[in-house]
Image (cartoon, rainbow, N blue to C red):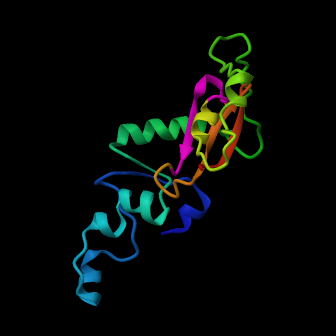
Amino acid sequence: MYSPALTDFVFMVQDTSYMFVTGPDVVKTVTNEVVTKEQLGGAKMHSTVSGVSHRAFKNDIHAISATRKLLGYLPQNSQTKREHKDWSQHDEVNQASSQLLNNIIPNDPNKPYDMKFVIENVTDRQDFFEIMPEYAKNIITGFGEVGGKTVGFVANQP
């Protein structure tokens, strides 16, 4: 049951998606503890506490939309490459100025800065699809495009 979290992307819908080995009734019988399905293995718990779910959504429509967006960054199978999108002819490509990026990190090493801002300013169209935004908030992971090619991001959030 937990294998998908190790091999795939897991998206859950709040108040309708649950993932647990044994349900609340078994927990009550064995430990005499009363827990709800949501507390035991709901979308919020798995996307904020356990890290088993990569994203939690308000409803099925948002989950399906996000799934489509994620799949847009990936090739259709292991035998083909993802289609390169040529954004050079469009104004939609992010044109982050070197001046902006050169001034992001402060001279004072004790002063924090926002890595999401950096990522959004180097990705095409300032479009960044974050994976696990509610879990381990000190690390940022996700996908974007730079020059029409998919880029995976892993960054520390100071």
Q: Quadrant of residue 105?
A: top right
Question: At 62% from the left edge and 16% from the top edge, which residue is drawn?
Answer: 92
Q: Whole-percent x and y of residue 95?
A: 68, 19
Q: Whole-percent x and y of residue 59?
A: 33, 43
Question: At 31% from the left edge and 74% from the top edge, which residue is drawn?
Answer: 23
Q: Nearer the viewer, residue 42 or 120?
A: 120
Task: Check the image and name the residue furthest to the bottom.
Answer: 30
Question: At 50% from the left edge and 68% from the top edge, which residue is drawn?
Answer: 2
Q: Is residue 86 left or right of residue 64?
A: right
| Residue 129 falls within the magenta-colored stretch | yes
Q: Quadrant of residue 75?
A: top right
Q: Quadrant of residue 83?
A: top right
Instruction: Name above or below for residue 17 compared with residue 91.
Output: below
Q: Is residue 57 left or right of residue 97?
A: left
Q: Whole-percent x and y of residue 39?
A: 30, 67
Q: How many marks?
A: 0
Question: At 59% from the left edge and 49% from the top edge, which residue is drawn?
Answer: 157
| Residue 59 falls within the magenta-colored stretch | no
Task: Check the image and name the residue furthest to the front.
Answer: 108
Q: Whole-percent x and y of residue 146?
A: 71, 29
Q: Nearer the viewer, residue 6 or 138?
A: 138
Q: Nearer the viewer, residue 73 or 88?
A: 88
Q: Write down the region rendered in magenta.
A: 121-132
